[in-house]
Amino acid sequence: MVDFCPDDTPQLKAWRGEVRAFLEAELPGGMTFDYDYDEDEAGWDAYLAFWRKVGAKKWIGLTWPEEFGGLGRSAIERWILQEEFAEYAAPSHPIIGMAVAAGLLRHGTHAQRLRHLPGIASGAVQWGEGYSEPGSGSDLASLTTRAHLDGDHWVLNGQKTLGTAAHRAQWMSVLARTDPEAPGHSAISCFLVPLDAPGIQMLPLHNMADGQQNQTFFDNVRLPADSLLGDVNKAWNQIWFGLGGEALDPPGPSPDPYRYRIVRMLRKVMSYCRETRHRGRPLMEDPVVRLQLAELLEGVEAIRTQYYESYSNAVTGITVGPRPIALNLHQAYYKEFWPRFAQTCMEIVGPMAQIQGGRWACLNGELEHYFRGSVSNHAGGTSQLKRMVLATRGLGLPR
Amino acid sequence: MVDFCPDDTPQLKAWRGEVRAFLEAELPGGMTFDYDYDEDEAGWDAYLAFWRKVGAKKWIGLTWPEEFGGLGRSAIERWILQEEFAEYAAPSHPIIGMAVAAGLLRHGTHAQRLRHLPGIASGAVQWGEGYSEPGSGSDLASLTTRAHLDGDHWVLNGQKTLGTAAHRAQWMSVLARTDPEAPGHSAISCFLVPLDAPGIQMLPLHNMADGQQNQTFFDNVRLPADSLLGDVNKAWNQIWFGLGGEALDPPGPSPDPYRYRIVRMLRKVMSYCRETRHRGRPLMEDPVVRLQLAELLEGVEAIRTQYYESYSNAVTGITVGPRPIALNLHQAYYKEFWPRFAQTCMEIVGPMAQIQGGRWACLNGELEHYFRGSVSNHAGGTSQLKRMVLATRGLGLPR
Amino acid sequence: MSIDLNFNEQQQLIQNTAREFFQKHCPIDVVRRAEKADEEYPADLWRGMADLGWLGITFPEAYGGLGCSFLDLYALYGELGRSLAPVPHLECVALAGTLVAELGSETQKAEWLPRIAAGEAILTPALMEPDGLYGPDGVTLSARRDGDNFLLNGVKLLVAYAKSADRLVCAARIGTGDGAAGVSLFLVDPKAPGVSLEKTTNMASAPLYAVIFKDVAVPTSDALGEVGGAWPVLDATVMKAAVLQSAMVVGAGEVVLDMTADYARTRVQFGQPIGRHQAVQYLVTDIAIEQNLTRNLALRAAWRIESGRSFLREAALAKACASKAAAAMTFAAHEVHAGIGFMLDYDLQLYTLRAKHWESNLGDRRHCLERAMAEGGDDPLPHFQHA
Amino acid sequence: MSIDLNFNEQQQLIQNTAREFFQKHCPIDVVRRAEKADEEYPADLWRGMADLGWLGITFPEAYGGLGCSFLDLYALYGELGRSLAPVPHLECVALAGTLVAELGSETQKAEWLPRIAAGEAILTPALMEPDGLYGPDGVTLSARRDGDNFLLNGVKLLVAYAKSADRLVCAARIGTGDGAAGVSLFLVDPKAPGVSLEKTTNMASAPLYAVIFKDVAVPTSDALGEVGGAWPVLDATVMKAAVLQSAMVVGAGEVVLDMTADYARTRVQFGQPIGRHQAVQYLVTDIAIEQNLTRNLALRAAWRIESGRSFLREAALAKACASKAAAAMTFAAHEVHAGIGFMLDYDLQLYTLRAKHWESNLGDRRHCLERAMAEGGDDPLPHFQHA
């Protein structure tokens, strides 16, 4: 039955109220979070402190079994929690850790789950990712970092790049080739690597949005046997494609604060247009600006309805429409829309949008920073890759 | 030396005046020509009659040697003539015949030139094209129509489709495979085929713009040896790619009335916007419409400057910019811009733009017809093909 | 149920029944034949729809209807879009009939609704005027009180099925001004003295007319709803119909997507299926994306209507998206098909030319975008909870 | 010559000399270092340009200039775009210096032009205000007569190199109204009492300032041109500079195209160079197309200036196109480069962030499109002959 209303019971309404009360209490007023690319140390500390409060309520692992630090709550409760976090611009849950957790829940051993999930759930342990390599971006199947068994240990060698959050992390999820003979993605395994292990070196890479990504070098890093997540040689389907690659790259089945910035930014730009007068008239009454905003509104609303579609598909198990293409389609659309959105917002605000801070900056410089951040729309797989997957696996066109 | 002015001498100014005086005298006032897709018989008769007047002045072959029915005049005189024909919406010179003539001038024997060029130059003989096949569109190298030598005759068998102007023609330029063993485009030859030869059958195909294209069937059509244009098996480079494929598909080195419709249509839409009031205000003063028109203006002006670039490249022999990419680039741009242009014009004029004729039609229904015609932007090779050639041959990307 | 984007059982039943019905009774040849036929719509097809109850699908049962909900109707419209069924359902049922049901007196409802439902009467709206405006300011056709009559003067354009119609539901203006106040609806017999019809063909072969009103006397009893106060219900009805028009775009888009993906899989050029080329893959996925955006936005608008929520903003967004999709999907399909798609023999053009009509019907993209902004007021992006 | 789009020998010489000069003296490391340096531009680079005569390239020879034509200057600007040379040439020579040359008194010209040409003085324009408007209505900074002085009050934003400048060429308004009448130019010492500077960084690391004028007394002798009548020359000078800015986009576009095509040829993913994928081919050809459109439109505008023809319409079209190209070319380049292009280590970002500045500098796309329409009047698409 068609329904777009997540909280249709008093219990769910109360739950929303509980989440909102927590956010009102715990989010420092006016503080904004720019997630992955924010290298402000004070910001990071506040971010961590907030997560740990969320973790203390067991809301990071809201839907996980209690033995792993969760509360065993329902998907719709998580949706509502995510909505509120998104609306409040709360720091996004530790994104890499959440992907690792998803992998652990599906493919981890009980011991692995017991070992790693509580740390993620409490906010105590941060995870970074080691997927991309200098020669291996969208085509992860071509990676060359390798691991071989030496007795009961895996020995890891290679280099990872563009590692989001790695310099903030204690652990890293690393994809490595475990059969030098097998081609492509058929011999890739996933390892859970403590970053204080001997043989690991990390160098910073600075990006256009003032953030740090990382190069990580592995030189004969010895890992105990239970560092392997899932089956050997099967990470491509089990971890990366089945979960990591998709779940890393929302919209998943619920809104997330990171992507939801697009909604909040549009609101901010609209407010700016209401408050700012050019030639004595609010920008909002300029017919051209109005139409530009309306086209952005359409795209942003389309993205919001795509969240509903993803959730409906995931939870009802029935695909809306004749083909199971929603997730890739949403990703392709979002990745293409995002930079266009940022560009149009800059055009609407005009030449002063380029000022980065201080009293002459528009929107406190947030839009300018957001624009630079939009250059990272490749993260989690380029739009070209999403289109290719949509065309071939989704619509059956030949590879 | 940078110069965008075609007529910088009194002689050239006088020449422009002569062309203009001819057009003023010979073009029935208010008559519009829709070239290849106009199946109005009276229109076609007027079209032919006009061509023959142009032919009588030897202006069809203006730059050809006199012995072939030309006047041996300069490229810049032809540019000026074309400009004026384009501005006056004069019927386009017989487009297929002009391509055949270009091939004859480069690769024909003296006897072939003497035989065919005067008929084209006078407007007496019309040519159609037999290039596309049901299984062979943008990829002409895959064509299957074949010709084999039988004594001193070629015997032609196969089927052509989408043949522009074929039902109006006495002769046809046909590409056929002359070596069944050789792959792709390495065994294609070009034949000059009289359409009254035994074994030829033609069936009409009707298109979305009220026009007729044609299917032509060749059943053991016997052609004398001198029907072959250029070298055997070399048509791909000599005729089609070197000339046909490019010259068929302007902008070549001078403006042409067919593509120049885009300029005239923009003028008409602008006039409409000046004359039409909505809510008491001329459409032209609507800020959104104004900006839409300005973007169309930019594109149309870019296309006009591309004509200059093509001419400069062709006549000075020096490529503007570091790469010889202009022609394919222009074609790709035009083919992508055209349907967008037609779509935007329809949006500007609004819902009444869909009315096809009568007193309630906007712009006499010309825009509506033009919109349908824009669906034919594939003719002469799709934009996708032009992009591919631009990327690989122009910019050196791998095939 | 909380979040669920799937039709319920009744809607699935309607969808499946309609798909089978149109596959059987309205294959594409029927669409082609209707383009050339003298009758404005195939009478047997219309009768078949009447037999299934679809001509009164949302009318109250008391008036011969099925009393179905908006989402039930929405399910039917996806199939009308898929099949291109050349019938006046949108005009006669979703617009004119619904206006009678919403605004009509007991007498008017009793007179027209059962006959519409039975397929015995055609009513069609006469809304647009030469200016091409969709708002209340587009209604300038004058209605002047003259004793027991109103005298109508003016011009309506793009009136579909006017020649077949038993009554036009004509929007007219009483008094001066250009706002919502003054907009009135009248049931006008197109054969009444002073009414003249001029056929105005469009590319979609829709039976459209210019209708010229010259001192047309309409009895006061043929006013539909409050004289001068019809705009709010007219507007809401048009916006609901715009959501149905969007559903047609979604349905037709599925066919265009299938047709184009099939062609891309099977057409070989340069030694391989053209669908292997990324340029073609982008075009095919463009269709899928446009269709998806429209489907989600239209379904959300339909749900808001169904659940009694405010819907004008969401309906406007849906139709804005549908208008773009109508153009973009068919454009992409033609880019993939190239020469063959330009030929009348090939079926793609049937979708393309109708999509062009739908693009501006009941609100073009610009109007709908402006409307969405206006309806959003100071809260154009409401919190998820209220969404 | 009739139709010819190639530079003449002198322009080729300038182009070649400049390319070699910047390759030698302004490799990309110089651009990077300038971002962090205390000095607002590399003094040795500026001096080298002075030695070649480029700081007075278009100034009359009597004032230490080379007396070169606009197309000569245009040829230089392609190379400024290619090299991203972090120097105030556009501000000091093409704008402020040209305004002095066009409008200055004999005294003013003698005082400033030779020193600019010698690299001994920096003048910079102060034009934009918080509203961000490019037309005469954007000039609201007030100039009020007070004895032998004018008193200036107001704010200028995006004033480049203000701290290094010997004088600002400041646009101000005398009297009321918002039209062209009343726009005046003044030579203002940025160290004068009442002037305060606030650094406002942008993403291109341009040395931009907010300049606040509080009762700044400027002697009447420091008015540049007719008080209240400066707009036409200011406007023409800005529009010429907009063509030069477009030339920079064209030059930078060539580098971005080369960089991206090279990357597409050499980066291997999925077992082949990514440049074999049509999606990547489209992105690379997007760059080529945007660059081509801008180059042709900018060159035509430059030719019209050179040949004494009207040029405002063509200059506006060129800059409109350049603004779009600046964004579109760098967008496409980043799509091809993905992760690596987002890193500061890689050079692409240097182009991207400057292109963002150029996009709105001297007229953003919307302003320029509106301007082109306005300048076209009733004949927005003149006959070829006049083109």
Image (cartoon, coloured by chain):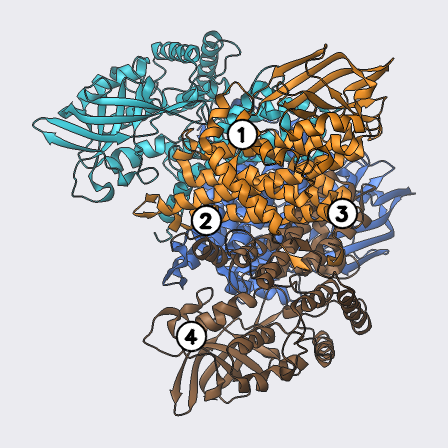
Chain colours: A cyan, B brown, C blue, D orange
- Which tag is nearer the camera, tag 2 or tag 1? 1
Tell me the number on the disc at residue B384. Answer: none
The residue tagged 3 is D308
Callout 2: SS? helix
Where residue B240 appears, x then y in whole percent? 49, 70
**Spatial distance from mark 2 to mark 4, Cα to Cα?**
34 Å
Query: Hey, what amino acid is under mark 4?
Result: Lys
Which mark lies nearer to you, 4 or 3? 3
Compute the Cα span from label 2 to label 1: 47 Å
- Residue extending farthest top: A25
Instruction: Tell me which residue sits at (36%, 20%) in the image.
Output: A94
Chain letter for mark 1, please: D
Chain under disc 2 = C
- Numbered badge on residue B234: 4
Residue C235 seen: no
- Badge 3 crowding class, 10 Å Cα cut-off, few under 14, some 14 to 19, many 20 or more, is few
The residue at which mark 1 appears reads as D45
Q: Secondary structure at mark 3?
A: loop
The image quarter in which residue D363 lies: top right
> Of all residues shown, which one is farthest toward the bottom?
B151
How far, Cα to Cα, is label 4 from label 1? 56 Å
Position of residue A323 measured from the top left corner of the image (x, y, whole percent) = 40, 45
Tell us which disc is closer to us: 1 or 3: 1
Residue mark closest to the camera, 2 vs 4: 4
SS state under label 1: helix
Alpha carbon of mark 3 to alpha carbon of mark 2: how far? 47 Å
Tell me the amino acid under the disc marked 3: Gly
The three-letter amino acid code for the residue at tag 1 is Leu
Instruction: Answer left or right for A388 relative to A106.
Output: right
Which residue position is annotated with label 2? C282
Q: Which of the two labelled residues, at mark 1 and mark 3, occupies the earlier sequence position?
A: 1
Up-down: is D287 above or below B248? above
